[in-house]
Amino acid sequence: MTNPDDANPRHPAAPPRSILVVFEKFPPVTVSGSWRPFFFVKHLPEFGYISHVISADPEANDPTDDALIRQLDPRCSFARKRMWTATIRQWIARPFRRTTRNRAGVSAKPATGHTGSADDIAPNPTVRPSLLFTLTYAIAWRLYWYVDWAAPVVAAGLSAAIRKRFDLVWVSGPHSRNLFAGYWLSVLLRKPLVLDIRDPWTYGSLWSPLTPDVARAEKKWARRILRRASRIVFTSPMTMREMHRRFPDIPHERMCTITNGFSADAIEPLRNAPTSVCLFRYVGTLNERRRPDVILDGLLAARETNSDLARDVRFEFVGGMAGHEQKIDAMGLADVVKSVGRVSHDDSLRMMHGADVNVLLQTITEGQDVVSGKAFEYLAAGKPILAVVSESGGDAWLIRDTNAGIVAQFDDAASVAAAIKHCWQAWKTGAGELTISDEQLARFSRRSLTRELATLFDEVLRDRSP
């Protein structure tokens, strides 16, 4: 396969421009949302843009990898800030957690945007929150949005602007608080704003304000921030269309899609299972929203109907099962299903390449237009993909667009069982490699995608030139 990263840089001689980057969970934090901004920052110097990144100090439970920062251009600079009211926010969350079990009718689930913590909460629509809860939550949300992260980001950005001249502000989400902070830096520094929106905003199962007051406030800010932006980048064309439908006053020509992607580095496969078995791997963290139940049910059903499949198929969950591993023993699958636990980012890529079938799992019921970032690393691994997702969602669109595997409806165990059987039969006949062309794959190289982003920056700055 030709390496899409062999192309010449766009700006081999021009002096670099400086951009101010805002993203709360930037590496060394290694949560799922970290990778997209990290790889853009990594490759942007090749195309004439040097980043100054404002991010948050890692919190106690954040997975980290300090080696990642050493991969970046030494001209990149960083400001890591502690959130000003983190302690106050945690203190306020205690009565929220008590309220979840009695007065307000809410349950543990992220509620303040696209990412959440154990202190976040989500509504039970059958119970009307009390007036005290509504008022307390209104205050807590405004601290969380207006002060907790935005204040240190704006202070850090203004301080950095004294020492260096920034050409534009680029901000990535989730969380939408990043977009709010980036908006104010754009206004105060009088620089163009480019938004990078990975997940749905103001809709979808990951957006769950607890009160109408907070919902109205965030929707108001969403429209204001979108209007300010010179360009708005989405990771899925379906998300872009849906956001344009919801915000028709935002000019469509300001919107575009730059998907997630993969690194074109050579990767040595990692596999502990013998080659005599068909190894399915899910790489990623499970949680209360993303459960393995439908996969385990489908695997159990497929084994019960075919003894050869029962002999051949093995399943691994890589990245942590969040307590769901107890279901493996309960269903009598301990001999064929293994929980590997967390591994490094490099080993996770090696394990994708060492599988016979890579598994996507997306079980959200709203906002299914997103495309998983992991799907592109799966494409690069060259193995068929079993996508247990919404048949009408973004992941299904990608799998079908690239002819990369098979889609099984995420709430239908019989569909999953049939898909497992299909993948196993392809493996038996030797038809288990992807047929995606080099040209199709090259467009998802992270360096190629960064070239698109740099071209967009060029357009923004050219449009603002006198």
Image (cartoon, helix red, strand yellow):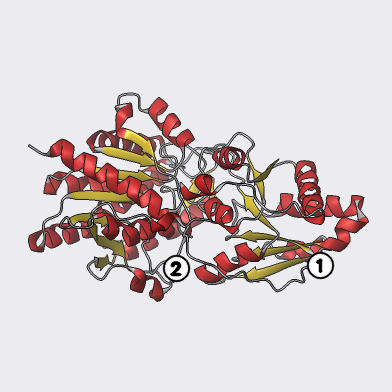
Image x and y of residue 109, in percent: 52, 51
Q: Residue at x 23, y 54 (%)?
A: 11
Q: Secondary structure at mark 1?
A: loop
Q: Is residue 104 visible?
A: no
Q: Earlier in the sequence, mark 1 or mark 2?
A: 2
Q: Does 26 sit above or below residue 189?
A: below
Q: Residue at x 25, y 33 (%)?
A: 227
Image x and y of residue 388, in percent: 67, 46
* Res 319 quadrant in image: bottom right
Which residue is labeled 1 in the image?
A: 276
Residue nearer the viewer, 78 or 463: 463
Q: Does 397 sit above or below residue 42?
A: above
Q: Report the amino acid beneath label 1.
A: Ser
Q: Which mark is residue 62?
A: 2
Residue nearer the viewer, 181 or 402: 402
Q: Secondary structure at mark 2?
A: loop
* Res 380 quadrant in image: bottom right
Left or right of 314, for residue 157: left
Image x and y of residue 398, in percent: 56, 41
Left or right of 152, for residue 466: left
